[in-house]
Amino acid sequence: MTAEINWTEITNDNQMNLESVLKLYDQAFPIEVREPYDVFQKGLKYATSSFPNSFRFLVGMEGDTVASFATGHYLADVNTGFIVYIVTNPLVRGNGLGSTTLLKMEELLKKDAISAGHSALRFSILETEMEELVHTEAEKEDCIKRERFYEKNNYRSHESINYLQPPLHGDTNGIPLNLLFKSFQGSQTITQIEISDIIQAMYREKYYEVNRIDKAILSKCLNKMGIDHTSF
């Protein structure tokens, strides 16, 4: 990379550059997968009392410009990082900025795994839009670019479950998304039991504890995916 990127984290006590980050966020995603702003604040507050779970809000700055950002949760029960958003500024992206941002977020999640008592992070997992969800040709092109980007960075699809993201805007129906994972230990595969446990942890720690989505809606989505969620 030619430009120098300075990395910082937004926290409950330090929200410098948040306004600029949110402007970039609004430009990057279709409304169906864009959370209300207050969810970020809830995540930051939750992180202050949820150890060994965590919430990370990473920002890369090029001078006074937000070059990129990423958010993610560490899910201690399944020793897995859940990367929620990763965005690069179209005015400065290129030269590997997206991959560097992803790597920096993975490093933070690895630190969380060690803090939780593990020798290493087990998996990193993320949701991506399906091409059928987009509204414009430009969004479709961005969707294809994301798929190629994550494949290049060793994220693979898990196709045995037709994954649903819980509704983010008060609807009762889940949003079909691709679910991608990356392994950091041993086998590069993930079992049906592991993926089911991880999805339950995502729903519990992210979509219930932070987003505060109703349990009945979450249960409905889990049922549609065929996931036994007695623990939820």
Image (cartoon, grey):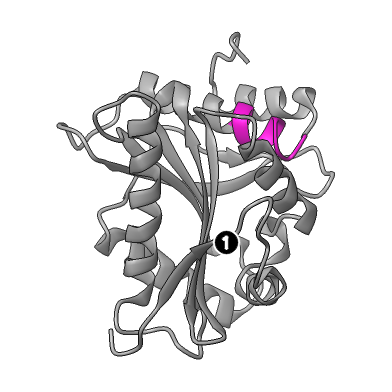
Give the prevailing secondary structure in the magenta stretch.
helix
Q: Position of residue 177 (x, y in %)?
A: 54, 49
State the quadrant of the N terminus: bottom left
Q: Is residue 85 visible?
A: no
**Location of mark 1 (residue):** 132
Q: Residue at x 70, y 31 (%)?
A: 209
Quadrant for residue 161, please give it. top left
Nearer to us in this view, 54 or 97: 54
- Residue at x-position 41% and y-position 37%: 112
Q: Which residues are magenta?
A: 203-212
Residue 138 image position (x, y, % from top left): 56, 82
How many numbered callouts? Answer: 1
User: Is 25 positioned to the left or the right of 128 in the image?
Assistant: right
Q: Is residue 121 left or right of residue 133?
A: left
Looking at the picture, does residue 120 appear above or below residue 100?
Answer: above
Residue 229 vertical placement versus 139 (above, below): above
Residue type at numbered disc 1? Glu
Please state the horizontal and vertical placement of residue 222, each as a whole percent of the image.
61, 25
- Secondary structure at badge 1 equals helix
